[in-house]
Image (cartoon, rainbow, N blue to C red):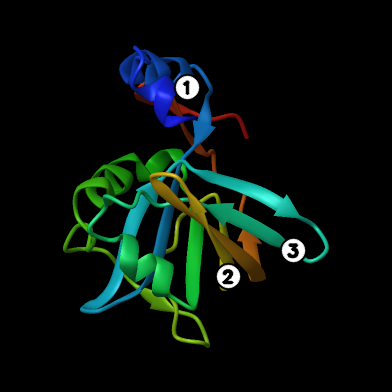
């Protein structure tokens, strides 16, 4: 999007509403932060490659958590289950989520949570500028998929995904 277009009547609210017509999954991404394990709710997740196994996600540069995630060498991406709606709401507000989060740690020391529909343990592979976001590419080093019904997001609301 060029600067000229944004300053010549481009309606960002209508653009966001139009993007909201695309139903997405919801993830919670976790990493070790400066004060311990932390998470963030994100719907900017996508598979990228099967060989090598790569996924990507994109934190907003305006987020106070941005730098911790961009600088993390390891992170976990959790495809939220429908039962994790409250957990997603909490991580959208606070880096440390609710007090009762039961953190687990991978062999490499990356924090993760249980109960998601799927989880991808990743090593940072690359990062790229993405306008007001940073695109983080992860090399998947391990994953689980347990078949829980996923949580989805459409038109500004959480909805039940299809499993």
* Residue 32 image position (x, y, % from top left): 35, 77
Q: Which residue corresponds to the image point at 54% horizontal and 46% vertical from the top-left?
A: 45
Of labels 2 and 1, the one closer to you: 1
Q: Are marks 1 and 3 in contact (CB under 8 Å)?
A: no
Numbered marks: total: 3
Earlier in the chain: of badge 2 and badge 1, it is 1
Residue 91: x and y in percent read 27, 52
Give the residue displayed 34% in from the left and 21% down from the top: 12
Where's residue 106, x and y in %?
A: 50, 81
Q: Residue 57 in the image: x percent, y percent?
A: 52, 52
Q: Which residue is disc 2 drawn over? A: 122
Q: Is residue 19 left or right of residue 157?
A: right
Location of mark 1 (residue):
19
Q: Is residue 81 above or below residue 22?
A: below
Residue bearing the label numbered 3: 53
Q: Nearer the viewer, residue 59 or 81?
A: 59
For this view, does 38 lie left or right of residue 45? left
Extreme residue toward the front, this view: 4
Residue 53 appears left or right of 120: right
In the rendered view, would you say 108 is above or below 8?
below
Crowding at dot 1, Cα within 10 Å, few <14 / some 14-19 / many 20+, comes out as few
- Numbered badge on residue 116: none
């Amino acid at each position: 999007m060029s600067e000229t277009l944004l300053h010549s009547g481009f309606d960002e609210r209508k653009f966001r509403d139009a993007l909201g017509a695309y139903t997405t999954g919801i993830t919670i991404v976790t990493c070790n932060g400066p004060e311990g394990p932390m998470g963030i709710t994100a719907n900017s997740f996508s598979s990228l490659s099967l060989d090598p196994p790569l996924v990507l996600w994109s934190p907003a540069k305006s987020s106070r958590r941005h730098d911790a995630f961009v600088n993390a060498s390891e992170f976990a991406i959790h495809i939220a289950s429908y039962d994790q709606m409250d957990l997603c709401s909490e991580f959208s507000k606070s880096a440390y989520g609710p007090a009762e989060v039961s953190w687990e740690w991978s062999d490499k020391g990356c924090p993760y949570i249980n109960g998601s529909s799927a989880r991808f343990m990743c090593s940072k592979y690359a990062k790229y500028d993405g306008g007001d976001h940073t695109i983080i590419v992860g090399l998947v080093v391990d994953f689980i998929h347990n078949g829980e019904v996923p949580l989805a997001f459409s038109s500004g609301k959480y909805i039940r995904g299809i499993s």
